[in-house]
Amino acid sequence: MTAELRRLRNYIDGEFRDAADGRTTEVIDPATGEAYASAPLSAAADVDAAMAAAAKAFPAWRDATPATRQRVILKIADVLEARQDELLAAECENTGKPLELTRQEELPMMLDQIRFFAGAARMLEGKSAGEYMDGLTSFVRREPVGVCAQVAPWNYPMMMAVWKFAPALAAGNAVVLKPSDTTPASGVFLAEVIGGVLAELELPQGVFNVVCGDRDTGRLMVEHPVPAMASITGSVRAGMEVAGSAAKDVKRVHLELGGKAPCVVFEDADIPAAVEGIRDGGFFNAGQDCTAATRVLVHESVHDEFVTALAKAAADVKTGDPSDEDCFYGPLNNAVHLEKVAGFIGRLPAHAKVEAGGERVGEKGYFFAPTVVSGLKQDDEIIQNEVFGPVITVQSFTSEEQAVTWSNDVEYALASSVWTKDHARAMRMSKVLDFGCVWINTHIPLVAEMPHGGFKKSGYGKDLSAYGFDDYTRVKHVMTAL
């Protein structure tokens, strides 16, 4: 490590700390490929300390009134909003995201989601008390599950942290959060804000802790005996490992693991609108989005028209540095991921055609051109596997039945979209598409009130909405003799 690197630290029980053994990792700015900070490489002693702090703080937080929890979470949103310039600086240096686009598109959503869950804290639901058996009264208590181990990804470090900590805290749980090892800065900033709010309101500091580290750190968190629940947003491989580890002591598991969203464009669709929506949904955040519009199926009668228009639209999309107000997306997250995305293009079969892009942009940073690939078959690697980059594939289908079959013929089942003017067809498709979300004549908008989560290898459990809040609670039946 060089002296110039900014020093990030864990946040445990209200204190910023280095890793107990002093180990660190470099944090790389993906727009430059150069290190800008160091972060703790936390090991068992650090995880033990964070879990002990959370366990100690949990009873008081559990017993706080819903109104108290709401007041705390609303205060967190207010402070983040007041300090948004600092938050955005940390997030964009973390990720290379365009600064102003992130301010416009991500920040308002994050603040709204935090405030939604602040309200959810006071909306605990259960069956009404009553006599369901003669001489006995029953009622339901909805309680927090306990300490939650949460692992956030690198594609939306701050927003995914919000999706995890906000419902968990609102329900009365204590949290140990691990940001991705490549994007820890905004998570550490979040700890500073939440810790400050807890201190100001004289509440236990251990309610929220941040532990930086790598996969081994995350594994230690999931395997630790203290957490009652493990939540991860990440790859299928990571999710399977978490589920296997959690099964050893029957922890609850909440998994959001990826997607391969089909966008089905019928012959009666508004083609310019579909092109624009799919372009934006496919290239936003450099395609590093589990719901990205990456896999387009177009009716054969409008296929060529659509491909020509999408390739032209892709050529107009600009990638660039976070400070460039004209760019639509920034770099890929890291050098390994850049190599992975480029590898998909390098391994394309002979029958595939690159209509736009297909190459790295520049020699500094991890930028990749907006890419469109046509001429693909259903069993091609790039159709079946998640690229997680600014790459949109296009296939031609002949019938509604074929479109449904091909759409569902992948291991992922997170999100999808249908583009048509035929309402009855849209309703049919919304029923048979095997995905956790079906958008109609749009792709990628999310709102705090509606659930986000998939099926199959996209995982289980819901983020956002009352369903996401419920995932962080448990239900207890209480029965008493009259």
Image (cartoon, helix red, strand yellow):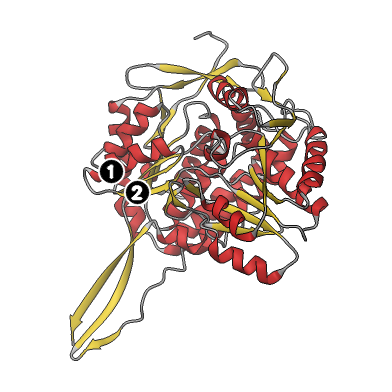
User: Relative to 477, does residue 186 appear above or below in the rendering?
Assistant: above
Q: In which quarter of the image is residue 144?
A: bottom left
Crowd class of label 2 (few under 14; some 14 to 19; many from 20; radius 10 Å): many
Task: Give how far across and how far down residue 476 sits, in percent.
Answer: 27, 68
Task: Give how far across and how far down residue 203 sits, in percent.
Answer: 40, 49
| Residue 308, numbered circle | none
424 and 203: which is toward the camera: 424
Query: Which residue shows up at 52% across the image and 52% down it?
Result: 408
Q: Which of marks 2 and 1 is nearer the N terminus?
A: 1
Task: Give how far across and how far down residue 435 sits, in percent.
Answer: 52, 56
Query: Which residue shows up at 57% across the image and 21% down it?
Result: 339
Residues under numbered marks 2 and 1 in contact, where contact means CB atoms less than 8 Å apart: yes
Q: Is mark 2 on a helix, strand or loop?
A: strand
Q: Is mark 1 on a helix, strand or loop?
A: helix
Asked if residue 251 lies left or right of residue 400, the reply is left
Disc 1: which residue: 246
The alpha-carbon separation of the residues under discs 2 and 1 comes to: 7 Å
248 and 382: which is toward the camera: 382
Q: How many marks?
A: 2
Q: Is residue 104 visible?
A: no
Q: In which quarter of the image is the C terminus?
A: bottom left
Query: Which residue shows up at 41% across the image and 47% down it?
Result: 255
Asked if residue 304 lies left or right of residue 412, the reply is right
| Residue 253, numbered circle | 2
Task: Give how far across and how far down residue 68 sits, in percent.
Answer: 45, 59
Q: What residue type is labelled 1?
A: Ala
User: Relative to 112, does residue 97 appear above or below in the rendering?
Assistant: above
Asked if residue 204 lies left or right of residue 439, the reply is left
